[in-house]
Image (spheres, grey):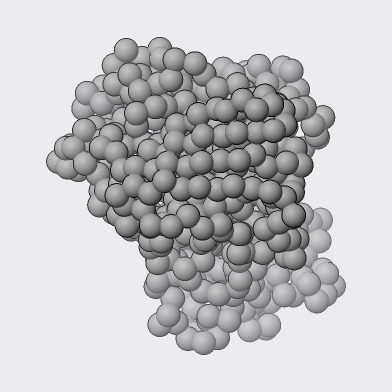
Amino acid sequence: MVKNSFRLIPGDDTTTFEQCLPSIDTLGATFENNGGWIKQKKSISSDELLKNGIGIFKIPVKHHGNYQIKLDIKSTKEIPDLKIFTNRRHLVVSKLTLGKKIAREVIFNVHVSQYRNTVGETRVQDDKAIYLTVMSGINYFPEITVQLESVNIPTIHILGDSIAADDEAYIPYNPQLTWSGWGQHLDQFFENIAINNQAHNGMTTECVRMDGDWQNVVSNLKPNDFVLFHLGHNDQKRSYLAPFDGYATNIRRFIKETRNYGGIPILMTSLSRIPLKDAYGDYFDALSIYAESIKQIGHELHVPVIDLHQKSFNYLLQLIKNNTTADYFLDAAHTNDYGADLVSNWIVECIEENTDLPLARYLKTTKPILSIKSSKTKRRLDNEMPITKPTSLKLIFRDTHFLEEQEKRYLLKVLELKLIDPTVSYLHPYDCMFLGMFIYSFSQVAKPFDRNKYLGKYDDISEHEWIAPYVQATIDAHLIDDVFIENDQLHIKKFVSGYQMISMIVRNLYPVKKRNTLSVKQCLNIAQKYGMLWENFEGDKPVSRLRCYLMMVRMNRILEIDDYNFF
């Protein structure tokens, strides 16, 4: 039995100090009573964790707000690399060195408020607790005294997407393989201010309002608090949220509302994806136009802008040159813990360089040490994957309860095939689907489907657009019938029609070499023969999202059973 002494000095708003073990054994960011950690071994006990130098604790509090935590740490052994996390795995101390019998004092701030799970139920969680994780890095756990008090300091509220969001990690902890948003690593750079990270996987400037993340910000927003906006990665996948259209409209509305609450808005351009080369050999990132929109809005409304996109684009070119991107990134856009550390460093650099940013006064004078252990890993980093998987197959969407039972059963298969995002609260089943979104969803089940450099076949698509490699894949796989092409335009921003959808679905059932021999009429006859057309089918009419997903499931079942031999 390891000897440990944990002593809490109660403040006005605290009660008891109790040890909290991870309670979730399945992958998925839910953060309920686990401090952001998942047990890799179900049987691991509290004593085993402590013997491995890991302590996870829960401090209940009575109220929302900001709290200061003071830790007095004493050790009888040398600890070269102690780490401290708080709440949903926010890194507050990245590297603390302890000598034998030398006490160290660590002070940091924590924000407590309601939050929404990344996966699963859409309800707001509000357990009114501070989670504290200490990792010594050796098979020993030091003696810690904790002092907690409520403090009246400003808050940075983050409204964002998966690039900034909180993500869980397995124990034993491997930072190289852990998904992490930069919002989890920003606390360590600041003092006299707290961070409320309401960023959420899959969010757009529309979803954050509809799903409740914006409400979680404004319900805790005090005068002179800061609201930091990082959105765009998912807006880009929806043509109605174009950078100077719906996206810009939503951002302007957030700015106005933030100011109405007495808050201080700060805009951030989207983190660059790992740059690709165009036909001239020049590097580009499809999010650059969203960055331009943000900078224009910042200028016209006098809102300070953190230009993370340009900063990260420049640094990513260096990583590409050094062949080290896989040390920090798990796909084209999402970082591991080392990458989140790196991105948060870039953000701090932007703040230091921008004299218009009042956040600079809250930066620590000494930056945390950025550590990285090269993995020599080889990964394909040209695609942006959905990083969140449902913990269980159940319909969590608020607008699907009224569907027929058979439709619900099909939607469970849709979830299993990863055709829809399990992080959003609304499916919008009867909205029509844009052709671009249909192509992106179809890529999850189409066979073969290899994203390639866009060769410029259609006049309405640029190789610099996010959707371009997916369009090229549909061209290479002969999934597009030329009858739908008008004036060399594919019209990806128009709704997919019944004829278009059935043509692509049926073509995908055939070997690639035979697909161009199929006319639309033949595809319709085949679909009719095997019950793939619905009642009152009108081929020239737009198709609903629900119908598109159900047809993809039917197609996938045929492929699973017969593997191209069905016909």
Give the image location of residue 546, x and y in percent. Answer: 49, 71
Q: Residue at x 62, y 64 (%)?
A: 24
Q: Quadrant of the C terminus?
A: bottom right
Give the image location of residue 465, x and y in percent. Answer: 53, 36
Instruction: Locate residue 448 relative to residue 428 in the image: left or right.
Output: right
Q: Quadrant of the N terminus?
A: bottom right
- Residue placed farthest to the bottom in the image? 405
How many labels, in total? 0
The answer to which quarter of the image holds residue 544 is bottom left
- In this view, 436 is above or below 433: above
Residue 15 is at least partly visible in this image: yes
Give the image location of residue 301, x and y in percent. Answer: 21, 27
Residue toward you, 69 or 444: 69
Instruction: Locate residue 397 relative to residue 420 in the image: left or right.
Output: left
- In this view, 308 is above or below 254: above
Residue toward you, 542 or 221: 221
Q: Residue at x 41, y 61 (%)?
A: 127
Instruction: Locate residue 324 relative to residue 256 in the image: left or right.
Output: right
The answer to which quarter of the image holds residue 368 is top right
Residue toward you, 105 or 307: 105
Give the image location of residue 385, x and y in percent. Answer: 63, 48
Q: Residue at x 34, y 32 (%)?
A: 193
Instruction: Locate residue 222 relative to residue 304 in the image: left or right.
Output: left
Residue 289 is at least partly visible in this image: no
Q: Residue at x 69, y 26 (%)?
A: 100
